Amino acid sequence: MAPRPRALELEPVPESDREGELPHPREQLELYGHENACRALAQAARSGQLHHAWIIAGPKGVGKATLAWRFVRSLLVHGAKDCNDELTIGDDHPVRRQIAALSHPDLILLRRPWDFTLKRFKSDLPVDEVRKLRGFFSRHSSFGGARIAVIDCADDMNSNSQNALLKILEEPPKGALLLLISHAPGALLATTRSRCRMLTLRKLSHDATLTAVDMLRPGLKEDERELVSALADGAPGRALAFAEAGAAEMYRDVVELLGGLPRMDAGGVFAFAEKTAKLPAENGMRLFSTLLMQVEERLLRGAFGAQHTLSSEQALMRKLQQVIPLESWQQLWEKLRQETGRAYDLNLDKKQHILNTLFAIEAAAQH
């Protein structure tokens, strides 16, 4: 009798560093707005003194992973001394296909693994994953160039994982290169940061974000294109993820509900919670939490600085400042963020969590 196929053979393993059905950053050839960062990496490579570890930092979705994989392709195709300033290679180069398939022998990717028992990603990047680097870097390069490890993202490492990584950073093997992608490098251990070169990517302008969205996701309706670009706040990848998840419709629903404060429409609240809870977790509860945080960020930025404001949310922002003081909003959002993380980790009832969140906002407004 033939052996029973394992789960691995029946379906592909989900990737924690991929957004929905969007192309993975290692498959994405286009990079928008970071010419100076490309040039800095290329010049460092050509200098012959390329540092062994880099933290590529910046807001989520701004292009950090796309830049990292662009650098990986250039190094493995051209070698360090021949990297061009744009970090480009031929579109049909066989190494590009190897990298996309993660089959190149001089490359390893570390990220949060998939838990086959719980059918979800592990909550952090465990130490066992980081320990794989020892075996990887102990081998000789197959083609005489660099051996490259990409960690996406470094923020997911727990303290044990970071301590295991430190041993490699302190005594880097010859020809080793580590690229750590980080949305919040300040949360990494100071000893980790001190042993890495930092390259920070800045947010794109609103117009540049619109251009990137038009190129990467053509055909969006004008109002959706404008809304996801504004919510992304200069991060094209985030705009694409929002478009993929249907964030525009949910954001309009959230704005309409919050617009009823200090007392929201009860029927609308229950209908929204039921509809959202039926969606997959990433497109439902997670997206709802993310969009609420967007309301908070846009409220605070609008109060203390300039930002691209949507006409559909101007009345809401004025009302939110009237019903709850800004400092109280900050405390409330932090509490709701913690509750969302707890609900997701413990797999609590999604509809009830959404209702609890909206009722907590209403209670705060009424007091």
Image: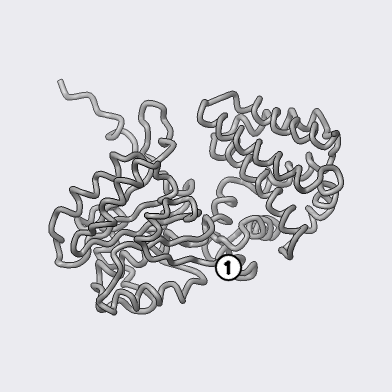
Q: Would you say 204 lies left or right of 112 here? A: right
Q: Is residue 252 visible?
A: yes
Q: Quadrant of residue 99?
A: bottom left
- The 10 Å Cα crowd at callout 1, few under 14, some 14 to 19, many 20 or more, is many
Q: Is residue 286 depicted above or below 104 in this figure? A: above
The residue drawn where x is 38% and y is 66% is 197
Q: Position of residue 238 (x, y in %)?
A: 55, 55
Q: Position of residue 14 (x, y in %)?
A: 39, 41
**Type of residue at label 1?**
Leu
**SS class, disc 1:** loop
Q: Is residue 98 depicted above or below 128 in this figure? A: below
Instruction: Quadrant for the N terminus, please.
Output: top left
Q: Is residue 153 visible?
A: no
Instruction: Quadrant for the C terminus, please.
Output: top right
Disc 1: which residue: 204
Q: Position of residue 109 (x, y in %)?
A: 31, 51
Q: Would you say 219 lies left or right of 25 here? A: right
Q: Would you say 272 lies left or right of 71 here? A: right
The residue drawn where x is 28% and y is 79% is 47
Q: Would you say 60 lies left or right of 194 here? A: right
Query: Number of callouts in the render?
Result: 1
Q: Position of residue 148 (x, y in %)?
A: 26, 59
Colour scheme used in the picture?
Answer: one colour
